[in-house]
Image (cartoon, rainbow, N blue to C red):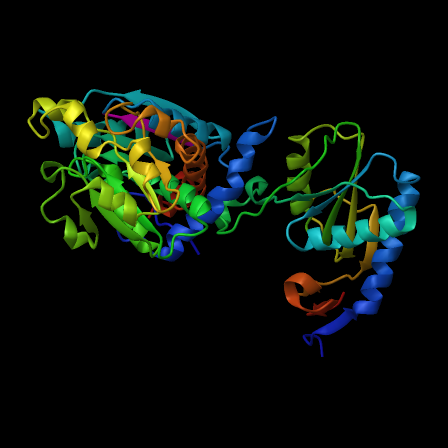
Amino acid sequence: MTILGKDLLGLAGLSREQVTAILDVAEPLRAISERAIKKVPTLRGMTVVNLFFEPSTRTRISFEFAEKRMSADTVNVATAASSVSKGETLVDTARNLEAMRIDMVVIRHPHSGAARFLAERIESNVINAGDGTHEHPTQGLLDLLTLREKLGGLEGKRICIIGDVLHSRVARSNIWGLKAMGAQVAVCGPRSLLPGAIRELGVEVFGRIEAAIEWADALNVLRLQLERMQLGYIPSLREYNRVFGVTRARLERAPRDLVILHPGPMNRGVEIDSDVADGPHSVILEQVTNGVAVRMAVLYLLAGNAPALADAARGTAV
Amino acid sequence: MPDAAQVALNSKAVARTISRMADEILELNAGLDRLVIVGIQRRGVQIADRLADVIRDREGADVPRGALDITLYRDDLQTVGPRPVVGRTQIPVDIDDQVVVIVDDVLFTGRTIRAALDELADFGRPARIMLAVLVDRGGRELPIHADVIGKRIEVGPGGRVDVFVPILDGRDEVVVSGALL
């Protein structure tokens, strides 16, 4: 009766039942972080390696909090990715870690597909913490948990993802997760930052943010990577803010109060203005709180789901 | 008919039993002083609520009520795997130096109570912890005993004791199936 299999690599392909189960487990786990003793013994004796081939502060810290609050032992490995020896290095690193008897790997990697590549080659549970421009499933789940709570459900709700969808693993995980839950999804941003075939994912496309705001119940505002300007995707940051910035003036013209999400870190004054980010409809800090809870839920639901490894540990390897 | 299900307590008997258990709790604690009633999810919470209702009627004052979900404190994650449902734990008051009564529907191996004791310890250090159960079916695997017992029904390992409560099950009775010892 396992809800998830051995790994969590993405939200693509997860059923509504699976996503709902993760969110339902995450909800009560949130209360653990409010206790005086912020810890439950659930994953006592399990070792989790956070294998980060790409700089990350909040995702890594969030995973680490989640692991520690579930009583797992954690090791952080931060490695700069070597473009020469990608595949082999990755697997060798993980196999060396496995030789030291670990149970789970949380991996962040600049290449799309790295998490799956690893999951197919090691026995430990693998959690994707962001692979290239592919998926960032736990970010998608924390967005779903936040939206479900704020909107009173997801079925039929309208969520628009604003900004650099082309390079965003957060956008992809959101689209797949939200669609699985029966929400309506749209994207809005400069043509140069929207994938050409984005409609194939079953999302609407808005060229003007005013139209998106009129349509939506919630906006998920993506971070604009500042180097996109140098690479010629947008003319200037000021221009981007003028055309696609989520500003109070724009939101005041909306027919309803919109819930505002942002995966962080924010570029204030570029994709989102400060008075929106700090305003009454922003749920950006709730997202951070929910992030720890959904990661605790994923760790719990994957734990004990590696029968081959458990057998090997008992000396009855298959 | 060793395997036929039979009603061990009907709704009137359940009410009488809970009423007596409430009296025993008050007797053991010499009143309401510092009393906190905490049910184990899910049916223990319903029984705890009914006990607290009776105590309120007897003494004319409310006792704090809490709920424990012990899923994250189980000792069988590696063998059984994760449970798909995690309930809420709510301890509404500071339990330091209080008298906490843990309430469950059925006491069997004692492993649930072991987990509940661990979880309670994460919330504080009660002066005393007592255990009240509607049914003690025997079969303990740990050195745990109940202070207040509604009914003892010795059931073999293959048997079942099901407590049905109105809110969750639409009926109010205790049903036993399988061989009685």
Residue A125 visible somewhere in the drawing: no
Identify the residue at horizontal 20%, vertical 51% (top origin): A204
A87 lies left or right of A108: left
Residue at left offset 37%, top offset 23%: A75
| Residue A265: quarter of image | top left
Name the residue rendered at 9%, 26% in the picture: A235
Q: Which residues are magenta?
A: A47-53
Q: Nearer the viewer, residue A242 or B127?
A: A242
Q: Residue at x 74, y 74 (%)?
A: B6
* Image height of A13 relative to B93, above or below: below
Residue A195 appears in the figure: yes
* Residue placed most toward the observer, B147 or B47: B47
Q: Is residue A150 above or below residue B177?
A: above
Quarter holding the N terminus of chain A is bottom left
Task: Give the x, y percent position of residue A220.
Answer: 30, 39
Q: Quadrant of residue B3?
A: bottom right
